[in-house]
Image (cartoon, rainbow, N blue to C red):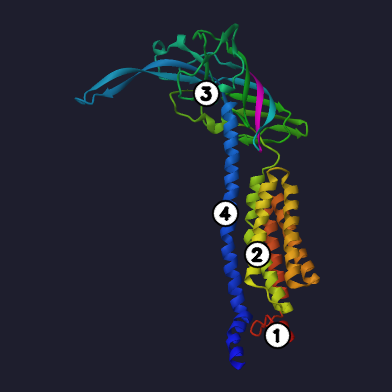
Amino acid sequence: MESSQLQQTPKKSLKNNVYFKITTIIIIVLLLLVPTAMVHNLIQEREQTQNQAIEEVSSKWAGAQTLVAPILSIPYIKYVRETSKKDTTEKIVAVKDYIHILPDNLEITGTINPEKRNRGIYDIVVYNSKVEITGTFKALDFSALDILPQNIKLDKAEFVVGIDDLRGIEKQVELQWNNQQLFFNPGVSSTDVVASGINAAVLVDPLQKENYRFKLTLDLKGSQNLYFVPVGKVTDVKLSSSWPNPSFTGAFLPDSRSVAENGFKANWNVLHLNRNYPQMWTGSRFDLDASAFGIDLLLPVDNYQKAYRSVQYAILFIGFTFLVFFFIEVLNKVFIHPIQYILVGVALIVFYTLLLSISEHISFDLAFIVSALSTLLLIAGYVRAILKSSKLTLLLSAILVILYAFIFVIIQLQDYALLIGSIGIFVILALSMYFSRQIDWYNLNLTEKVNKNE
């Protein structure tokens, strides 16, 4: 009989050892970081699937569009020294280069008609737009360039409109150049400024003292983004659309804008002094895309970004829940098995997979409530079964409700997430210190009540 008791003593002492319990809890928390990382990878994978769906629709419709319009490109002949590879002798050869001239005044008026397309469970925003482009080029003056007049091929001048995705052009484009009506050709002769676009051969006269007037209307479709490059000495862009959730992005924000439930209106006014390239140059010296601005037709909710932010607090959520369990053990003299810790931890992680999957079909806020309520009921029922105490179950449930509400608020307040999160962690730490202030850590017996019953 005594030997039997002696054999059971080590097992009981290990069970009652608070330091062993703390070490076990820490190990469980660290192990639960593995499925937490898997949830993070799952969110990333679903986001990549959404991006692939967007690319697939864009590849069949038209991609994001950037308009660089217009540029007057005139070829000229320049002479350069070329060294022969065989005998290292130098000779002068004639090569073709381009003079690029930007308009003096540019006005763009556009109307954007968005549509929401579906690819599986994903929504993609595409649009049709009608853009009217008007303005003037100053009378030509090449005196600032070190080029002989006879080397400039004025008869080869081109009116160039840069367009990222030519599949977006829906109708034939006509150009009114002074009193002439011209049609565009596909492609560009020089890729110094734009990689793709359309061009029209125009007549220019170095003796003309009046400005060249131009006007064209472009029916253009694309996906999600529409940008403009301010190539005018003065560029004025006016856009309107029925889309209620625009994001104004790029190098310049609108000078004025109005956004309502029935759409938006925006106006940009950009001067040549606001950008880092001149009105005339030769060759490919400048990157015009760096000054692009425009709109991004955002979908109202980005579920994956919110899911990312919520899973960042998983370690805090699991750690604090386990801390509450540990305090319940210490203060109420009950024993919770490590396996039970693991099951509760897994339930907390399953919350994130529920949130991710449900939010792909309904709004994120509603998905959060459904997932949190399901997880809460699961854990509360399990705790009630193992602790046999309604009071402790209600206490733990209240703490979980506060934690879920805390994370929900942080997700909604993106700009103040760090502030609210820091304050919340401070409050959690203060409460932990308060409730543990009277614990005698050197004299703990986790199963005292059980032993008394025995």
Q: Seen in the image, is 380 located left or right of residue 344?
A: right
Most extreme residue toward the front, as rendered?
1
Q: Residues within 10 Å of mark 4 (few under 14, many from 20)?
A: few
**Residue, disc 2:** 343
**Residue, disc 1:** 451
The rendered magenta stretch, by its main secondary structure, is classed as strand
Q: Quadrant of residue 351?
A: bottom right
The numbered mark, 1 or 3, whose residue comes first in the sequence reads 3
Q: Residues within 10 Å of mark 2 (few under 14, many from 20)?
A: few
The numbered mark, 2 or 3, whose residue comes first in the sequence reads 3
The numbered mark, 4 or 1, whose residue comes first in the sequence reads 4
Identity of the residue drawn at 57% across and 32% down:
56
Q: Is residue 131 located in the magenta-colored stretch of the structure?
A: yes
The numbered mark, 4 or 3, whose residue comes first in the sequence reads 4
Q: Amino acid at mark 4?
A: Met
The numbered mark, 2 or 4, whose residue comes first in the sequence reads 4
**Residue, disc 4:** 38
Disc on res. 279: 3
